[in-house]
Image (tube, grey):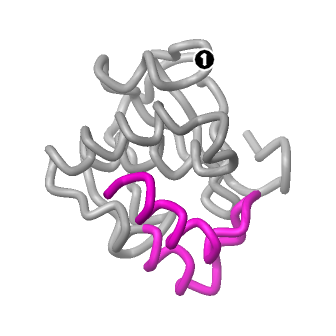
């Protein structure tokens, strides 16, 4: 399947139970665009573990990767998604993910072109996650 926003390739993953309430439609599975970070509900969980390094070489793996993907996908609107962003950041940090470093790496990648201004998000995230 291709991304509805940019026609990029999508990466399917299982959404951890704790993450579902923080995403629209509370999906059990989702797909994230490897290029623009758009997240869409998935039809079903993939049969194999996703390779999150296809998004970014330093991307977390396993459940931490699924949480990180959900976190990044919510950054399009800090005002509307603030509580979800805070909750997902907390879950990510519990799984060893430095969310600010993840945002920095995504911004510096040169390949990822999110559907939001990722460079402006870093200082804004510092303020709400402090």
Q: Quadrant of residue 47?
A: top left
Residue at image coords 69%, 54%: 9
Residue 68: where, in percent of width, then height? 38, 49
Q: How many marks?
A: 1
**Magenta span:** 103-130
Quarter of the image with the N terminus is top right
Q: Residue 87: image x %, image y %?
A: 35, 34
Q: Is residue 79 magenta?
A: no
Q: In what quadrant of the picture does the C terminus appear?
A: bottom left
Q: Is residue 128 inside the magenta stretch?
A: yes
| Residue at position x 26%, y 42% in the image | 90
**Which residue position holds label 1?**
43
| Percent position of residue 91, x then y | 25, 38
Locate residue 73 relative to residue 92 in the image: left or right.
right
Q: Relative to the observer, which residue lies in front, 6 or 86? A: 86
| Helix, strand or loop for the magenta stretch, by majority | helix
Residue visible at 40% across and 27% down? 15
Q: Nearer the viewer, residue 79 or 112?
A: 79
The front one of 26 and 76 is 76
Q: Secondary structure at mark 1?
A: loop
Q: Residues within 10 Å of mark 1 (few under 14, many from 20)?
A: few
Q: Nearer the viewer, residue 118 or 20?
A: 118
Location of residue 81 by image quarter? top right
Side (left or right) of 49 relative to 4: left
Q: Position of residue 128 (x, y in %)?
A: 44, 53
Who's the residue at 54% across and 83% down the image? 109
């Amino acid at each position: 399947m291709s991304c509805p926003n940019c026609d990029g390739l999508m990466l399917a993953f299982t959404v951890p139970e704790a993450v579902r309430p923080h995403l629209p439609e509370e999906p059990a599975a989702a797909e994230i665009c490897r290029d623009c970070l758009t997240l869409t509900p998935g039809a079903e969980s993939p049969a194999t573990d996703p390779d999150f390094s296809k998004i970014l070489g330093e991307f977390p793996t396993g459940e931490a990767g699924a949480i990180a993907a959900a976190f990044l996908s919510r950054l399009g609107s800090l005002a509307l998604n603030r509580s979800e962003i805070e909750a997902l950041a907390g879950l990510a940090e519990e799984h060893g993910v430095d969310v600010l470093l993840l945002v920095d790496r995504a911004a510096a990648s040169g390949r990822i072109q999110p559907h939001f201004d990722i460079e402006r998000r870093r200082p804004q995230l510092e303020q709400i996650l402090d």
